Amino acid sequence: MVTTTTATAAFVSIAARPASPSTATLCAGSHADPVVPAVGLLDVPESLRSMIMAHLPAKDLVAAERTHRELLDDTRRYAMDTVRQKYAERRLPLADLAQDEPVTWWSDWADGATLGPLGMQPPSPTCTSRDPKKLRAPPIGFWMRELWAWENAVQVPSEEYATVQDAAGAAPPGAHVLVAAGMHVVPQTLVINKRLQLLGEAGADGSPLTTIKGQNLQQNHSVVRAAHGGRVGLCGIAVWCYASDSLRRSSVSVDAGGHLYARQVGVKCVSGRYSAGVQVHEGGHLLMHTCSVRCCTGSGVIIFGSGTLQGTTLCDNWFNGVEVQKGARGSLTDCHIHSNGYSNNDDDLGSGVTVYGEGSEANLRRCVVHSNKGGGVLIHSGAKGALQHCQVSMNHAGFEFGDVDVDTSSEAVLDHCEIKGNGEHGREQYRVLAVQQQAKLTLRNCTVRCQASSFGTGIEVQRGASLDISHCKIHGCTGSGVLLRDQDTKATIHHSVLEDNDLHGLEVQAGSITVDAQTHLTNNRVHNIYISGTNGECQTNIDKSSSGKVFRK
C-alpha cells in the first residue's frame, strides 16, 4: 500500500530536479518499482499540485500506477498549454531545439516528424510527417524543460540587458533569450558555450522580424558561434554579417563539441571573399529546418563535422550552395538549392552541392537542385553520395563537369531521380552525368535528358570509371544517350530504355559494355548502338534482342 507521504515525496522529486535518467520510487517491497521519467525543473502552481495530490492515496500498486499517470498527464497538459501560448505570441513554430535526445520540432503536438539524432539519416522518402509509425509524442520532460526555459527567460532589450551579448551572458543554462523584433548590431562574436535558445519574432508569413547583425568583425570570426559545450538554438532570427573589406568571415559557426539547432532562420554573409553563411568545424554538429542561406560571398553552408538540413533554401551564394568536406557527413531533405556559383570569363565556378575528400558522405532526399553555375551535384576525391527522389536540372556545368559529376575514386547512387541538363551558351561536349577517374556511378529508376544546343551526352564514362544502370530511361539528348570514352571503363545496362537521342543510343569508343535483353534501344537518330573503337579496344556483351542492329566502325 502507498502512503500519501511517499507519493507526495515522489511528486516533489519529479517536479524539482533536473532532467536525468534516474527514477522515483512509488512502492516499497517485493514489487518492481515503476520507472518514472525525470521531467526537469518545474515549480508547479499550488492549485494544480493540490488537485493532483487529491488522487494520490491508493489502495494498491495498480491504483498507484494509474494515479501517477494521471499526475503526469495533468502536469503535461498544464505545461503544454502554457508553452504553446508563449510560442504563438511570437509567431514561432514550437521547437525543441536543444535536447540531448532525438530532436523533433512541433508545429502541432499531433503533427511532427522525428528527424532522429545527429548522424542518423532522416525519414525515408515514402514517409510523411503524418505517418504514425514515424511520430512520437513529446515526452513530458520536453514540456517541463520548455516551461522552465520560458519562466526563466531573459528579454532584450530591457532595463537589465541592453544588448544580446549581455542577455546571453546572464541567462541561466537552458533558458530562452527573447530577442525583440528589429535590428541588433553586435560589435564582436556572440560566443555561446552553454545550453541556450535565442528566440526572435516572426511575421505573419513566418519570416524573421528579428535580425542579429555583425559588422566589421575580425577576420575568420562569425556573428554567432556555438563553442565547445554549447547547445545553441536559434528560432525566428536572421543572422547577417556585413563588411566592406576583403577579410573572410562567416555568419554562424559551430566549433568542435558544439551543437547548433536552427528553425526559421535566415542567414546572409556579405563580407570580403569566400565568406560562408554557416561553417561547421570538425566535431561540430548542425541541424537546420525551414531556413534560408543566401547572398554569401563564399559557400552557403560548409560542413567539416556533421550537418542535417531539412526544408532549407540555399541560393544566390557566390560559390557552392553546400560543401561537405574532409570526412564530414551531410544530410539534406526537401531542400531547394539554386542559383549558386558565378562565371569567371569562360569558367563556371561553384555548384549546388559539393562533396569532397576521402570519407566525406552526403545524402540528398527529395531535393531540387537547379540553375547553379558550376554543376548541380559534384562528388569528388574519394567521397560518397546518394540521391533519392531528387530533381537536378538546368545547371551550367560547361565542359569539365555535369549536372551530376562523380570523379576520382568516388561513389554515387541515384535512385528515382530526374536529371535534365541544358548546358550554357551553346557549349559543345556537354554531359548531364559524368563519371570518371576510377569513380563508380549507379542509377536506379532514373530519367536522364540533355537539351544542350549540340552534342549533349546523357551519361559519359571515362578514365577507368564504371557505370551500372537499371530501370532507367535516357532520352532526348542532342548527342548520345550513353558514351564510353576510354579504355578500362565499363558499363552495365539492365531493364532500361535509350531512345530518341539525336546521335546514338549507346556509343562505345573504348571499354567494356554489357546490355541485357530487357534493355530497349530505339528511335535514335544515327545508330542505336555504335561501337567505334576510336580510343582503344572495345569488349561488348550485347543481347541482340535488345537493340536490333549494332553498328561497328
Image (cartoon, grey):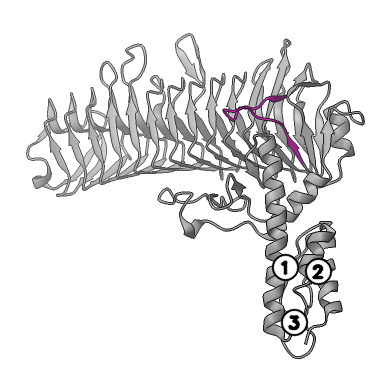
Mark 1 is surrounded, within 10 Å at the Cα level, by few (under 14), some (14 to 19) or many (20 or more) other residues, namely: many
Q: Does 69 sit above or below residue 174?
A: below
Residue 553 appears in the figure? no
Are dots 1 and 2 in contact, CB under 8 Å? yes
**Which residues, given as a range, are shown in magenta?**
197-211
Q: Picture coordinates of residue 52 (x, y %)?
A: 76, 67
Q: Quadrant of residue 503?
A: top left
Q: Quadrant of residue 232?
A: top right
Q: Tell me the amino acid under the disc marked 3.
A: Ala
Mark 3 is surrounded, within 10 Å at the Cα level, by few (under 14), some (14 to 19) or many (20 or more) other residues, namely: some
Q: Which residue is mark 1?
A: 71
Q: Which residue is mark 3?
A: 58
What is the distance, in whole Å, between disc 3 and disc 2 at their CAs? 14 Å
Picture residue at 46% right of the left edge, 22% below the top: 372
Residue closer to the observer: 150 or 114 = 150
Q: Earlier in the sequence, mark 1 or mark 2?
A: 2
Q: Which residue is mark 2?
A: 11
Q: Quadrant of residue 95?
A: top right
Q: Is 423 situated left or right of 271 in this image? A: left
Q: Does 66 sit above or below residue 545?
A: below
Residue 508 part of the magenta segment: no
Q: In front: mark 3 or mark 2? A: 3
User: Considering the numbered disc 1 on the image, is that residue within a helix, a strand or a loop?
Assistant: helix
Picture residue at 35% right of the left edge, 19% below the top: 423
Q: Picture coordinates of residue 356 (x, y %)?
A: 54, 36
Q: Picture coordinates of residue 329 (x, y %)?
A: 58, 44
Picture residue at 76% right of the left edge, 26% below the top: 223
Residue closer to the observer: 188 or 151 = 151
Q: Earlier in the sequence, mark 3 or mark 2?
A: 2
Q: Tell me the amino acid under the disc marked 1.
A: Leu
